[in-house]
Each structure stands twice: as structure tokens, then as C-alpha cells.
Image (cartoon, grey):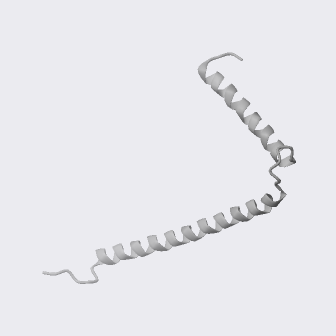
């Protein structure tokens, strides 16, 4: 005996697949929108950058990077049990 074409299991599986496809499409569209937003932010900042080491943006980035390196050094010392 053959099962009918509109068996409840098949209908449920098809509905789930369609739902997953809709959610995946919405997430993909949101991801693309977020990437576009980040691109616009980078393009807005990029014209102000000159690439010179003495520019204000580069100096601030270097200070932040040095601060992060110092924090990492301290955390590694604490993890290894060395007293600073």
C-alpha cells in the first residue's frame, strides 16, 4: 500500500525546509547589510588617513596597541605566577 502524497510527515518536512530557507535568506540579507554598513564606515574614515606615522589616527592606534601589549604581558606574568 502506498502512502498518500500529502502525508503529514512529508508536509511537515517540506514546511520546515521552507522555513529554514526563509530564515537563511533573511540572515544572509542582514549579513550583507551589516557588511555594507562596515564598508561605509571604513570609506568614511579612509579619506582622513594619510598613512603617515605622525597623523593623529596612527598615533592613537599605536598608543592603544602599546597599552594592549602591556596588558597582555601583565596577564601572561600573572598566569605564569611571576610577581611584577
User: Considering only vertical position in the picture, is 52 above or below 12?
Assistant: above
Q: Residue reaching furthest left? A: 1
Task: Give residue 74's position: percent from left, percent from top.
Answer: 69, 26
Which residue is found at the position 82% from the left and 54% from the top?
49
- Asked where in the image residue 71 lies, by quadrant, the reply is top right
Viewer-proximal residue, 75 or 65? 65
Q: Residue reaching furthest top? A: 83
Viewer-proximal residue, 14 or 64? 64
- Asked where in the image residue 48 lies, by quadrant, the reply is bottom right
User: Considering only vertical position in the picture, is 4 above or below 68?
Assistant: below
User: Considering only vertical position in the picture, is 46 above or below 71?
Assistant: below
Which residue is found at the position 71% from the left and 33% from the top?
69
Which residue is found at the position 70% from the left and 65% from the top?
37
- Asked where in the image residue 77 lies, by quadrant, the reply is top right
Task: Give residue 6's position: percent from left, percent from top.
Answer: 28, 83
User: Considering only vertical position in the picture, is 61 above or below 10?
Assistant: above
Viewer-proximal residue, 58 or 29? 58
Q: Is residue 30 left or right of residue 68?
A: left
Which residue is found at the position 45% from the left and 70% from the top?
20
Q: Is residue 36 left or right of residue 8?
A: right
Task: Give residue 23's position: percent from left, percent from top.
Answer: 50, 70
In the rendered image, which quarter contains the C terminus? top right
Q: Is residue 11 left or right of residue 48?
A: left
Task: Give residue 46's position: percent from left, percent from top.
Answer: 78, 58
In the rendered image, which quarter contains the N terminus? bottom left
Q: Is residue 64 left or right of residue 77?
A: right
The image shows a total of numbered marks equal to 0
Amino acid at each position: 500500500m502506498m502512502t498518500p502524497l500529502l502525508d503529514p510527515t512529508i508536509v511537515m518536512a517540506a514546511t520546515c525546509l521552507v522555513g529554514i530557507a526563509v530564515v537563511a535568506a533573511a540572515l544572509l540579507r542582514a549579513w550583507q547589510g551589516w557588511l555594507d554598513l562596515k564598508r561605509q564606515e571604513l570609506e568614511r574614515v579612509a579619506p582622513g588617513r594619510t598613512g603617515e606615522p605622525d597623523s593623529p589616527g596612527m598615533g592613537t592606534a599605536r598608543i592603544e596597541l602599546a597599552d594592549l601589549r602591556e596588558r597582555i604581558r601583565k596577564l601572561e606574568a600573572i598566569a605564569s605566577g611571576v610577581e611584577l
